[in-house]
Image (cartoon, rainbow, N blue to C red):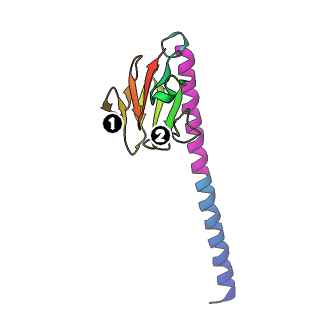
Amino acid sequence: MPPALIHALTWIFLGLLWLFFLRAIRAVWVEVRQQRRSFEEAAEEVKKASGSNLSPLKLRIVEPQDIAGTSYELKEETTIGRSPGCGVPIEFDDFASGIHARIFVRDNKLWIEDLESTNGTFLNEREVLRPVQLKRGDIVQAGNTLFEVYR
């Protein structure tokens, strides 16, 4: 092959490679912006519901007994798991996943969903297979930890 053709093909390849990276970066940017927008919309829903029964709901540990009574305030999105970054960290529970479940706001109501945890999430002794609405007095089990939803 003539050197001029190799040189031209090299520049074409580099140009296509740059286009690929720019498209990938753009796709990530669009996804992040959409997630940010949905988070802001959820925050607005919580603000609208500030007079309703959403804002005062909390999660209190019932079992294990040695830390029973520890409570956590529920926000527009709260995760439960062994990861220290979770809103409800249960790093002491070996049966809980890193990010086990999430509690979130939808239609001005609190919902819980299992995040494909190894041992499942249970609400009032029933396995959570899809998002389920939370109410005051509900018992949530993540791993071996039991929580009560209260005001």
Describe residue 40's horizontal placement relative to residue 109 as left or right: right
Q: Nearer the viewer, mark 1 or mark 2?
A: 2
Find residue 46 and report its horizontal and vertical position in percent.
54, 20
What residue lies at 59% left-to-right and 55% top-to-bottom? Answer: 23
Residue picked out by circle 2: 93
Describe residue 89's horizontal placement relative to residue 106 as left or right: right
Q: Nearer the viewer, residue 96 or 113?
A: 96
Report the span colored magenta. Answer: 26-49
For the N terminus, which image quadrant?
A: bottom right
Find residue 59 and report its horizontal and vertical position in percent.
49, 23
Q: Nearer the viewer, residue 149 or 31?
A: 149
Residue 129, which numbered label?
Answer: 1
The span from disc 1 to disc 2 (Cα, nearest Å) is 21 Å
Mark 2: which secondary structure? Answer: loop
What residue lies at 57% left-to-right and 24% top-to-bottom? Answer: 43
1 and 2 marks in contact (CB < 8 Å): no
Q: Does the image show residue 132?
A: yes
User: In which quarter of the view is residue 122 placed?
Assistant: top left
Find residue 2 and report its horizontal and vertical position in percent.
65, 89
User: Mark 2 belongs to which amino acid?
Assistant: Asp
